[in-house]
Image: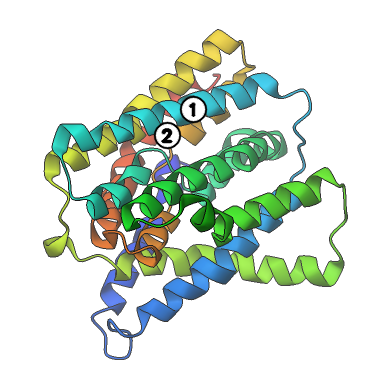
Amino acid sequence: MSIALLLLPDFLLIALGAGLRRVRGFDRAFWPGVERLVYFVLFPALLFRSLATSPLGLADAGRLVAVGLGFTLGGMALSALAQPVFRLPQATFAACFQCGFRFNTYIALAAAASLGGEAGLATISLLIGVLVPVVNVAAVGMLARGQGTRLALEIARNPLVLACAAGILWKAAALPLPDVAKHLLSLLAGAAVPLGLLAVGAGLTLASASVPPAAAAWWHGVKLLVMPALALALAHVAGLSPLERTVAVAMASVPTAPSAYILATQMKGDGASAALLISSGTLLAAITMPLWIALVAPT
């Protein structure tokens, strides 16, 4: 299936959320509860389940992990440069900073399955397990600093970080998930994607988004152009296999995760600007992501 077609349902759900907000009964008062449900229950369940049941461990995957950390840290550094360049309000910068390096896990998983089947899923599961805590700690840290709160406390009680840590520890201990727990987590995780995307759409208030066009272009360039290019270069230097190289570039080229908007709103950042970057970035990625994959995928 075309990568563009994989992205289309996500964008349509964002559009549906934007439309529902204008329907009586689904207006502004309805969505904060949805956001909290996704942020505190559904996304943590999805992250814990994906890490605890990942088919691939960390052994013998040092080069792939190094490439993933390399392009992610590069994206973080370039995202941070937007503040001295554009001198944005702290709430706007803290919310949008994460949009230069966070990734849409669901699109990444779907793309990996299409590109490499079970082997592709196993490969990208390793990257997700390593990178999810890294990007969440960076995002929470910037938003916590924007609030003037204690960083360690905010990170320690963040439900996404806690879910990632618990999932990795469960996997490391080689503990099986009981069938009832596995089924419950599957149900919760299945609801996370559509509700998260609907919440992104409902949060779109484009007229009030304070991020300047130049700053938005900066973060889109970092996420959709520079990070995939960096992943491709690092993959060649590291000597990754064709499948690992393709999965690394696919992971680097996916748009920003919808949870970036939810995190921004829950931590009193500029959620409208984050939502603008997420929705427009998802649309742009329908063009850029297939091009990057076509460049690197084995023929």
- Residue 216 shows in the view: yes
The structure residue drawn at horizontal position 58% and vertical position 70%, both measured from the top left corner, is: 41
158 with respect to 56 (left or right): left
The mark total stands at 2
Pointer 2 local density, CA inside 10 Å: few below 14, some 14–19, many at least 20: many
Identify residue type, mark 1: Val
Residue 298 occupies quadrant: top right
Colouring style: rainbow
Query: On the image, numbered disc 2 is attached to which residue?
Result: 253
The structure residue drawn at horizontal position 13% and vertical position 43%, both measured from the top left corner, is: 213
Q: Are marks 2 and 1 in contact (CB under 8 Å)?
A: yes
Pointer 1 local density, CA inside 10 Å: few below 14, some 14–19, many at least 20: many
Identify residue type, mark 2: Ser
Kindly identify which numbered label has been placed on residue 4. none
Q: Residue furthest bottom?
A: 25
Query: On the image, numbered disc 1 is attached to which residue?
Result: 249
Position of residue 118 relative to residue 78, above or below, is below
Position of residue 93 measured from the top left corner of the image (x, y, whole percent): 26, 47
Identify which residue, 146 or 228, lies in the foreground.
Answer: 146
The structure residue drawn at horizontal position 47% and vertical position 22%, both measured from the top left corner, is: 231
SS state under label 2: helix
Position of residue 249 relative to residue 50, above or below, is above
Residue 263 occupies quadrant: bottom left
Position of residue 288 relative to residue 40, above or below, is above
SS state under label 1: helix
Q: CA distance from mark 2 to mark 1?
A: 6 Å
The structure residue drawn at horizontal position 79% and vertical position 28%, both measured from the top left corner, is: 59
Position of residue 296 measured from the top left corner of the image (x, y, whole percent): 48, 20
